[in-house]
Image (cartoon, grey):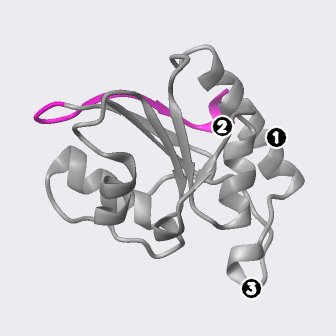
């Protein structure tokens, strides 16, 4: 199983938090990363997003049906991401769009096996392959594409 953890792209400030949308810069970031992903993803991947507007807009850049999972709202624990994705026993590639610091905490747990405050840049992703320990296949930043 491959798991791609993608942080939402740059978003507007404001409230309510779940309604914050991507900025013009954020839409460009999401499209650059989506373009990189499209040529690398298998046809049968699944796309899951937090219910926050900025996350669903980032996911929609892939132009595929998005499954919204309310358990992935900002502040979700690593266990919510593991449950939503089926990690590590799923049979296909899963792309999950979420939030910081949630994704950073999950990555530290999966890759380093400990609690830590890892940071993902807005719009960046980590691509993991299940294993013990997981294999980091790619780390992508929209600013480097």
Q: Position of residue 123 (x, y in %)?
A: 63, 47
Q: Secondary structure beneath disc 1?
A: helix
Judged left or right of residue 101, residue 40 is right
Residue designated by label 2? 142
Work out which residue is located at the far left of the displayed protein and give it: 132
Work out which residue is located at the far bottom of the displayed protein and give it: 15
Quadrant in the rendering for residue 128: top left
Viewer-side label of 1, 3? 3
Quadrant housing the C terminus: top right
Q: For the residues labelled 3 and 2, say whether their Cβ atoms are less than 8 Å apart.
A: no
Q: CA distance from mark 1 to mark 3?
A: 23 Å
Residue 107 vs 80, above or below: the answer is above
Q: In the image, what residue occupies the spot 63% across and 30% down? A: 144
Q: Secondary structure beneath disc 3?
A: loop
Per the rendering, the mark at residue 16 is 3
Q: Position of residue 119 (x, y in %)?
A: 43, 57
Residue 77 vs 1, above or below: the answer is below
Residue 102 vs 89, above or below: the answer is below
Q: For the residues labelled 2 and 1, say whether their Cβ atoms are less than 8 Å apart.
A: yes
Q: What are the residue bounds of the magenta stretch?
A: 131-145
Q: Position of residue 120 (x, y in %)?
A: 49, 53
Quadrant housing the N terminus: top left
Q: In the image, what residue occupies the spot 62% across and 14% down? A: 39
Dot 3 or dot 2, earlier in sequence: 3
Viewer-side label of 3, 2? 3
Residue 49 in view (yes/no):
yes
Residue designated by label 1? 28
């Amino acid at each position: 199983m491959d798991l791609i953890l993608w942080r939402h792209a740059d978003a507007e400030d404001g409230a309510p938090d779940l309604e914050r949308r991507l900025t013009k810069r954020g839409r460009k970031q999401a499209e650059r990363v989506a373009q990189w992903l499209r040529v690398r993803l298998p046809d049968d991947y699944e796309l899951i997003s937090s219910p926050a507007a900025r996350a669903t807009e980032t996911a929609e850049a892939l132009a595929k049906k998005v499954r919204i999972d309310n358990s992935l709202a900002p502040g979700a624990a690593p266990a919510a991401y593991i449950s939503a994705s089926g990690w590590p026993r799923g049979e296909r590639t899963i792309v999950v769009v979420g939030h910081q610091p949630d994704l950073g905490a999950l990555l530290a747990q999966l890759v380093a096996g400990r609690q830590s405050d890892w940071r993902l840049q807005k719009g960046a992703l980590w691509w993991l392959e299940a294993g013990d320990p997981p294999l980091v296949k790619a780390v992508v930043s929209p600013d480097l594409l």
